[in-house]
Image: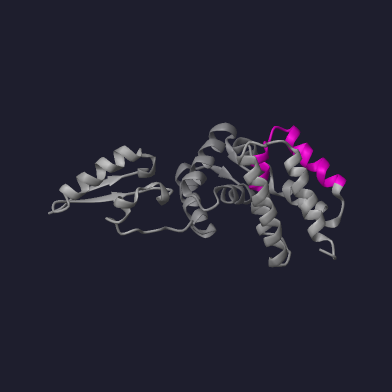
């Protein structure tokens, strides 16, 4: 009978450790099977990847996340409302571990799962606030869009928080797909600049200006 070794978070291993693991996998291939779980398979060296059958798992659907959250809520007798549950699903983005962690933090911090409590504990901008910013920029009310973005900034949300919120909201906009793709392209450029270290609010101003320009009939 073969032994089974499961290595979780394998992509956190250094290259030297992975090289050593490669030799171990080769030496014990007749008696042992190795299962490596990781978030980013690109961080696993090619010699190990070539020895494995790679299985990729998609994010969970909203229905699957809700079903598991309701089961936990029932078992733990947690007070909640529907909007609070929807907030947990929205922030999880298909990640069950994130959803459960946010649920636990919200209950520990406030005692009840509501829309406001979830966003307060998780310290993320509300989607309705992000949505209003995009709508104002699309409608041509650029100054109001800037004021709303600066309001979020002054509340302590950094550029990465706001960009993450923009990404989710844009995908759900009632806008032609071609236009949404243009918005997401400009947002990806903004995020690239943030990653490079330019994390000022001017990057958000520039993105909203692009949204305004792209929304004009002549664009």
Foreground residue among 129 and 186: 186
> How has the structure been colored for display?
one colour
Q: Is residue 83 above or below residue 105?
A: below
Foreground residue among 57 and 90: 57
- Residue 181 lies in the magenta-colored region: no
Main SS, magenta region, reads helix
Magenta span of residues: 143-165
Quarter of the figure with residue 147 = top right
Is any part of residue 61 visible from this angle? Answer: yes
Q: Residue at x 50, y 54 (%)?
A: 65
Q: Residue at x 39, y 40 (%)?
A: 12
- Residue 147 lies in the magenta-colored region: yes
Q: Is residue 90 left or right of residue 6?
A: right
Q: Residue 130: percent from the left, percent from the top?
A: 73, 48
Q: Residue at x 28, y 46 (%)?
A: 6
- Quadrant placement of the N terminus: bottom left
Q: Is residue 177 left or right of residue 42?
A: right
């Amino acid at each position: 009978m073969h032994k089974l070794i499961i290595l979780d978070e394998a992509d956190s291993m250094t290259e030297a450790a992975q090289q050593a693991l490669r030799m171990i996998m080769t030496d014990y291939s007749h008696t042992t099977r190795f299962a490596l779980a990781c978030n980013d398979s690109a961080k696993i060296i090619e010699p190990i990847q070539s020895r494995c059958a790679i299985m990729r798992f998609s994010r969970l659907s909203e229905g699957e996340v809700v079903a598991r959250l309701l089961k936990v809520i029932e078992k733990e007798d947690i007070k909640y409302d529907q909007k609070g549950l929807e907030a947990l699903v929205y922030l999880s983005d298909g990640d069950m571990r994130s959803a459960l962690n946010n649920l636990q933090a919200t209950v520990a911090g406030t005692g009840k799962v509501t829309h406001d409590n979830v966003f307060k504990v998780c310290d993320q901008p509300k989607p309705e606030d992000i949505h209003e910013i995009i709508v104002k920029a699309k409608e041509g009310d650029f100054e109001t869009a800037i004021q709303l973005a600066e309001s979020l900034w002054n509340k302590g949300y950094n550029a990465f928080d706001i960009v993450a919120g923009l990404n989710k909201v844009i995908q759900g906009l009632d806008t032609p797909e071609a236009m949404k793709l243009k918005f997401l392209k400009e947002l990806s450029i903004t995020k690239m600049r943030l990653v490079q270290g330019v994390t000022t609010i001017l990057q958000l101003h520039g993105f909203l200006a692009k949204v305004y320009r792209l929304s004009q009939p002549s664009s």
